[in-house]
Image: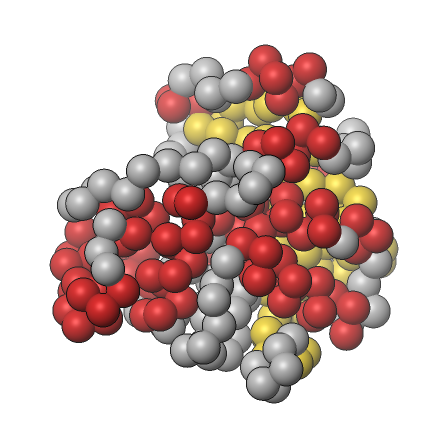
């Protein structure tokens, strides 16, 4: 385990690090998750192994600190990751990022371009969305006022998301989960999609084949983003079909 101070208050991001050759690969998890449980199995696969790899937990999540005063915006998450990468001596990283982590990765690449050389986005959030009471995921969490979520709304979320997601969500700070969800559904200005379109580095977007055509895929492809549908999986592609995930990710990283 490694760590770096990333806020003026002394809060630390932590990550599990595997030694190896460059370029460095950085793995970022989604809302309420943690990178090691989601990525360790695929990182060890022969097609991906051998690179220096940082399985990094965003502030408020997993083994990283959970500051109650942090805003947990996408920009704040991205800047914190940037601070950790600088402390780790990393430039030009290949970033593989799932869901909300994909949104953070796009913002990271836009705000700190020397730190990122390539993106593999795993069913990432690209567009703002409306909060929806009772829904699963970030839109349902964002529908709660923060005080209501902290006072007990989190228990309703726990019961909705199920034991698998809750296994890592329970490790996250409750302020972190709520504020991250609110900021994720609000998005950024320009939007994450617009930021992604404006990047000049190699970019790949993986999505579950069963979800059908990706919204706005034509625009992404026209800007140079490779859009790859992965069979036999849901949102957690690396867990649902690790072999297909590894093949698609390895191809993206070698392309």
Q: Is residue 173 left or right of residue 230?
A: left
Q: Residue drawn at (14%, 59%), measured in percent from left and top?
A: 156
Q: Is residue 237 visible?
A: no
Instruction: Kindly identify the residue that appears in the image at 24 percent across and 50 percent down.
Output: 143
From the viewer's perspective, is 135 left or right of 167?
left
Percent coordinates x, y for residue 155 in the rendering = 16, 65
For the point 71% across and 69% down, which residue is it?
Answer: 83
Q: Which of the image's four quarters has the C terminus?
A: top right
Furthest toward the bottom, the residue is 10
Above-or-below relation of 220 to 124: above
Vertical placement of 183 versus 171: above or below? above
Is residue 127 visible in the rendered structure shown here? yes
Q: Position of residue 200 (x, y in %)?
A: 79, 33
Nearer-the-camera pick, 235 or 42: 235
The spot of residue 249 in percent (x, y) is 64, 37
x then y, percent, for residue 202: 76, 33
| Total marks in image | 0
Residue 71 against residue 64 in the figure, above or below: above
Q: Which residue occupies the foreground of this view, 22 or 67?
A: 67
117 displayed left or right of 229: right
């Amino acid at each position: 385990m490694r760590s770096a101070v990333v806020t003026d208050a002394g809060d630390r991001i932590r990550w599990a690090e595997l030694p190896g050759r460059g370029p460095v690969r950085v793995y970022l998890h989604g809302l309420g998750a943690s990178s090691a449980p989601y990525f360790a199995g695929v990182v060890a696969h022969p097609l991906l192994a051998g690179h220096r790899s940082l399985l990094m937990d965003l502030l408020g999540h997993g083994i990283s600190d959970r500051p109650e005063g942090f805003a947990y915006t996408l920009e704040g998450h991205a800047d914190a990751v940037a601070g950790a990468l600088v402390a780790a001596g990393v430039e030009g990283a290949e970033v593989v990022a799932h869901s909300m982590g994909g949104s953070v990765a796009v913002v990271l690449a836009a705000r700190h371009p020397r730190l990122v050389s390539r993106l593999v986005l795993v069913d990432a959030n690209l567009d703002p969305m409306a909060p929806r009471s009772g829904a699963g995921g970030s839109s349902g969490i964002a529908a709660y006022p923060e005080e209501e979520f902290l006072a007990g709304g989190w228990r309703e979320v726990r019961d909705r998301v199920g034991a698998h997601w809750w296994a890592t969500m329970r490790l996250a700070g409750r302020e972190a989960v709520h504020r991250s969800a609110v900021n994720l559904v609000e998005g950024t200005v320009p939007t994450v999609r617009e930021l992604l379109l404006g990047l000049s580095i190699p970019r790949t977007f993986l999505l579950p084949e069963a979800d059908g055509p990706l919204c706005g895929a034509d625009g992404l492809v026209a800007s140079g983003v490779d859009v790859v549908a992965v069979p036999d999986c849901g949102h957690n592609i690396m867990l649902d079909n690790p072999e297909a995930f590894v093949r698609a990710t390895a191809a993206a990283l070698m392309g």
